[in-house]
Each structure stands twice: as structure tokens, then as C-alpha cells.
Image (cartoon, rainbow, N blue to C red):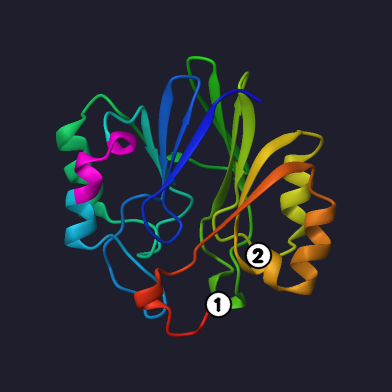
Amino acid sequence: MGKIKITLSANAGVCVEICGKRIWVDALHDRKTPGFSTVSPKLLTALWDAPAFQKPDTICYTHIHPDHYSRELTAEAFARWPEAALLLPGDPVTGGQYEASFGNVTLRFLRLPHEGAQYAHTLHYGILILSPEGNILISGDCAVAAPELQQAVGEVSLDVAILDFPWLTLGKGRAALEGLNAKNILLYHLPFSEDDINGY
């Protein structure tokens, strides 16, 4: 595995730096959801100054729920870095699988079910980041232990799997992790302590 750097914004927002590319996934959202954290005005000011949140090569989203995506903050990012690529579910990401390459880094978007029956029709994708320096899975809000995730990843050897925290806290999630070929697991979608009304 080469050098991989992963920086959290809030909730399920990350910047992945790999092979000289900077990839933001679900990094910009500002609508408060009870029990979870968002990019507050204070945090946003800090992000605009943070090294990881400078000059992205691509800004992408697993889905456009308000705890993952803000149209206004995304527009602000593009006003700062108009050369970045934008990859949104539905535009241009469509179908069961979609790929975009940036130099020797490929983003493979995998259509996966969102957690919760009420979100069954949500256009939602996990993302495989494939590169000579390592392979990373970002599951988004994929249903815990969904067989579609394992099928979509297939035989890809993962250096890092970034998953919502119930993949570890629920028994069915822990069982599913055993079948996922991942050297490292990073859990996210956790609130900051001041927002943790559920004791996560």
C-alpha cells in the first residue's frame, strides 16, 4: 500500500488523498440532522483553510441526502476551484456501475441499497477508489451487511474500507466484515461529541 491520507469533514464526509489526487466524498453538507454532525459555519471556515480541502481533483457524492450533500456549499467549492470534476448520482453517475478516471486513479461507483426500507428508492452509490497506491471502498449509507456490496467489490483487495459505524456495532455487520477483503477498516457517520444525543 502506498501513501493514503484520509481526512474527515463531518458525518460521512472525507477527503481521500492518493496518487497525488484529492477526492472529496460527501464532504460538503450543512443541514442539521438530529443526532449527527454537519459542516457548521465555523467548521466550514476551518475546512477552506485546511490543506486537505484545497484544490480537489473531484468532488463526488454517494447520494444527495442533506446529511451528505449541500448544493450551496458545492457551488461555493466550484467557485473556488472550477477545474474540479463533479460526480453526482444521476448526473453523470447512472446505471448499476459508473467509472471515472483521474490520471492513474479510477473511481468506480457501485449502485447499492441505502440503509432503511424508507430509502429503498434512493439513488445511492458506494465508491471504489482504485489506484497503484491502494484500493479504498467508501460504502456511503449502504444497508448493513447488504450482499450487493460484497458482490460489487468482488475479488478486489481493499487497503481501506470506510463504512458506517453499524457495520461494527451490529452482529450482522460484523459477520459481513469477515467476508470483506479489507486490511483496514475506518468507521464513520459518527457525530461529534456535542451532537451525540444517542450515546454512539
Looking at the rendered structure, the secondary structure element under dot 1 is helix
Say which quarter of the image contains residue 192. Answer: bottom left
Q: Is residue 128 magenta?
A: no
Q: CA distance from mark 1 to mark 2?
A: 12 Å
Residue sitting at x 78%, y 64%: 174
N-terminal-most mark, 1 or 2: 1
What residue lies at 72% left-to-right and 51% top-to-bottom? 149
The image shows residue 178, relative to residue 60, as above or below, that is below
Which dot marks residue 77? none
- The secondary structure that dominates the magenta segment is helix
Q: Amino acid at mark 2?
A: Ala
| Residue closest to the far front | 193
Q: Is residue 49 magenta?
A: yes
User: What residue is rendered at 55% in x and 77% in y?
Assistant: 118
Q: Is residue 162 left or right of residue 43?
A: right
Q: Which secondary structure lies at badge 2?
A: loop
Most foreground residue, 58 or 166: 166
Label 1 crowding class (10 Å Cα cut-off): few <14, some 14-19, many 20+?
Answer: few
**Residue 98 position within the rendered picture, expressed as x and y whole percent measured from the top left:** 56, 35
Q: Quadrant of the N terminus?
A: top right
Q: On the image, which quarter does residue 117 sit in? A: bottom right
The part of the image, by quadrant, that contains residue 181 is: top right
Residue type at numbered disc 1: Gln
Q: Which residues are magenta?
A: 46-53
Number of marks:
2
How far across and how far down the image is residue 33, in percent?
36, 75
Q: Is residue 28 left or right of residue 11?
A: left
Residue marked by disc 2 = 143
Identify residue for label 1: 118
